């Protein structure tokens, strides 16, 4: 399918009025590319493999058809249901994503007037409330694998009535070590079902999973970071001057909000303290914080009450923070895939965004790897007042030149200089 033939509005996708009305309220003017390509086939019952990241509109891609189908099926199935049934199962890697996806589904379904129940379950909080919520079964369950297995073993839920299975961020789920849990869960869902798999990347483990799980799927690949709406820039800086540069940028640009990525939980706190000394107040978001504290920080950030948030990669995936003006890589992510996930937090759904990477001498080679793997080439820039030392400059420029030339062959050997 080419983009010329794609439906330009939601009505053409075959969605029913209660969903269309909601999309109008949410001011979704037209389907994103993945929605336009996938929704008609998913509505027709096809399996789907989608190479898509957060920001592409992937949640609506599975949520809208799933809601429509389950709503249409519901009266017919009412009498066959057991008390602990689930019809649509969405598996996600993290608690934050579970809550976010469930919130989106609930929001999309408001005009079904409570006919469809959605529940989110995830670890880190008491299972009792979740068990209570699951009483009488649920139409849609959004779950992290570990907690779902716990709930199955205590009979709070059964998967033998699942009609639609969604694996969201499949690569993340497998890389977080959920392989065994996934296998156990997949053995519990019926063979006859519709399966929709979303993954930003397709390492071997994900490919094996797709082969085992999907029947004659349609395959769609969309770019997560849209070059036309996301500007990526790289600033070189002397080692030891990153914090000063960061503070300078925050003060100079007065961004409404910024999300700053570091690689370790401790670094979050250290950087927050250093920024505080420079008059900038920042909050931190990392895996050592309790679930309650994490939710509070995230809600406050989403509400715009926190202007600067320093986070580890736990925030790189899945978090949907509307219209984030800037994402800053203070530490470079370890994996090139994480670079794309991080920068995907900005410039979401057509908004213009900015992704900055601050690189010092030690980061230089790693950033080249990130660029190469992600097939991007960015010009190294210097910020006035933060010029790189002359000693390093020759080294920088000898490396930077081939990257700055768009027609560069890319075959030039790296000088290993660390
Ligand atoms: P997702 O990739 O599902 O995390 O969605 C990213 C963001 O885009 C969310 O805030 C959605 O509410 C929003 N969104 C999804 N589809 C559309 C659309 N067609 N038009 C405008 N915004 C959208």
Image (tube, helix red, strand yellow):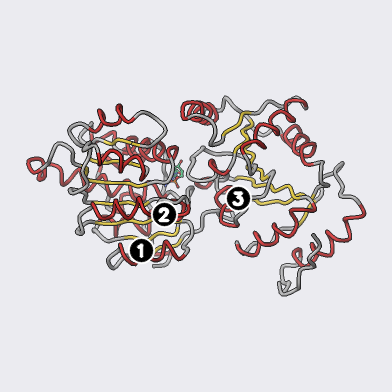
For this view, does 211 lie left or right of residue 383? left
Circle 3 or circle 1, nearest the eye: 1
Q: Position of residue 382 (x, y in %)?
A: 82, 49
Q: Residue at x 66, y 31 (%)?
A: 269
Q: Quadrant of ligand 1?
A: top left
User: In which quarter of the view is residue 123 placed?
Assistant: top left
Q: Earlier in the sequence, mark 1 or mark 2?
A: 2
The residue furthest left is 79
**Does label 1 point to a residue whose CB lies under 8 Å from ligand 1?**
no
> Residue 364, image x and y in percent?
75, 57
Mark 2 highlights which residue? 170
| Residue that mark 1 sits on | 210
State the SS at label 2: helix
Q: Nearer the viewer, residue 289 or 38?
A: 289
Residue 221 versus residue 320 in the image, above or below:
below
Above or below 62: residue 50: below
CB of mark 1 within 8 Å of CB of mark 2?
Answer: yes
CB of mark 3 near ligand 1 (< 8 Å)? no
Q: Are marks 3 and 1 in contact (CB under 8 Å)?
A: no
The N terminus - image quarter: bottom left
Q: Residues within 10 Å of mark 1 (few under 14, many from 20)?
A: some
Q: Quadrant of residue 411?
A: bottom right
Per the model, the C-alpha gap separating discs 2 and 3 is 25 Å
Residue drawn at x 75%, y 50% is 359
Sequence order check, earlier mark of 2 and 3: 2
In this view, the residue in front, 413 or 127, is: 127
Asked which secondary structure carries label 1, the reply is helix
The span from disc 3 to disc 1 (Cα, nearest Å) is: 30 Å
Residue to which mark 3 is pinned: 230
Which mark sits nearer the N-terminus, 3 or 1?
1
Tell me which residue sits at (76%, 37%) in the image.
243
Q: Position of residue 19 (x, y in %)?
A: 29, 42
């Amino acid at each position: 399918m080419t983009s010329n033939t794609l439906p330009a509005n939601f009505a053409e996708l075959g969605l029913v009025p209660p969903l269309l009305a909601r999309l109008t309220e949410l001011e979704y003017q037209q389907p994103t590319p993945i929605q336009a390509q996938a929704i008609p086939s998913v509505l027709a019952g096809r399996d789907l493999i989608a190479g898509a990241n957060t920001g592409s509109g992937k949640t609506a891609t599975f949520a809208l058809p799933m809601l429509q189908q389950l709503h249409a099926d519901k009266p017919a199935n009412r009498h066959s249901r057991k008390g602990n049934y689930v019809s649509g199962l969405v598996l996600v890697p993290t608690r934050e994503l579970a809550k976010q996806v469930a919130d989106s589904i609930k929001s999309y379904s408001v005009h079904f007037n409570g006919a469809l129940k959605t529940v989110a379950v995830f670890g880190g909080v008491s299972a009792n409330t979740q068990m209570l919520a699951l009483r009488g079964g649920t139409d849609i369950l959004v779950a992290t694998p570990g907690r779902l297995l716990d709930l199955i073993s205590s009979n709070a839920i059964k998967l033998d009535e699942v009609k639609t299975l969604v694996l969201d961020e499949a690569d993340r789920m497998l890389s977080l070590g959920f392989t065994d849990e996934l296998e156990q869960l997949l053995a519990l869902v019926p063979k006859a079902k519709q399966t929709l798999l979303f993954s930003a990347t397709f390492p071997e483990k994900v490919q094996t999973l797709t082969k085992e799980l999907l029947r004659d799927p349609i395959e769609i690949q969309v770019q997560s970071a849209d070059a036309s709406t996301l500007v990526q820039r790289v600033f070189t800086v002397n080692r030891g001057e990153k914090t000063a540069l960061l503070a300078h940028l925050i003060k100079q640009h007065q961004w409404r909000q910024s999300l700053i990525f570091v690689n370790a939980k401790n670094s979050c706190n250290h950087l927050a303290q250093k920024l505080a000394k420079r008059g900038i107040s920042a909050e931190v978001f990392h895996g050592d914080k309790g679930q309650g504290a994490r939710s509070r920080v995230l809600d406050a950030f989403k509400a715009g009450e926190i202007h600067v948030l320093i986070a580890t990669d736990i925030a790189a995936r899945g978090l949907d923070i509307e219209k984030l003006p800037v994402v800053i890589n203070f530490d470079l992510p370890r994996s090139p895939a994480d670079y794309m996930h991080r920068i995907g937090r900005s410039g979401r759904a057509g908004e213009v965004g900015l992704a900055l990477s601050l690189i010092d001498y030690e980061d230089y080679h790693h950033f080249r790897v990130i660029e190469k793997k992600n097939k991007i080439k960015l010009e190294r820039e210097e910020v006035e007042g933060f010029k790189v030392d002359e000693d390093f400059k020759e080294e920088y420029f000898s490396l930077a030149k081939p990257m700055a030339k768009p027609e560069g062959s890319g075959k030039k050997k790296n000088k290993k200089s660390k």
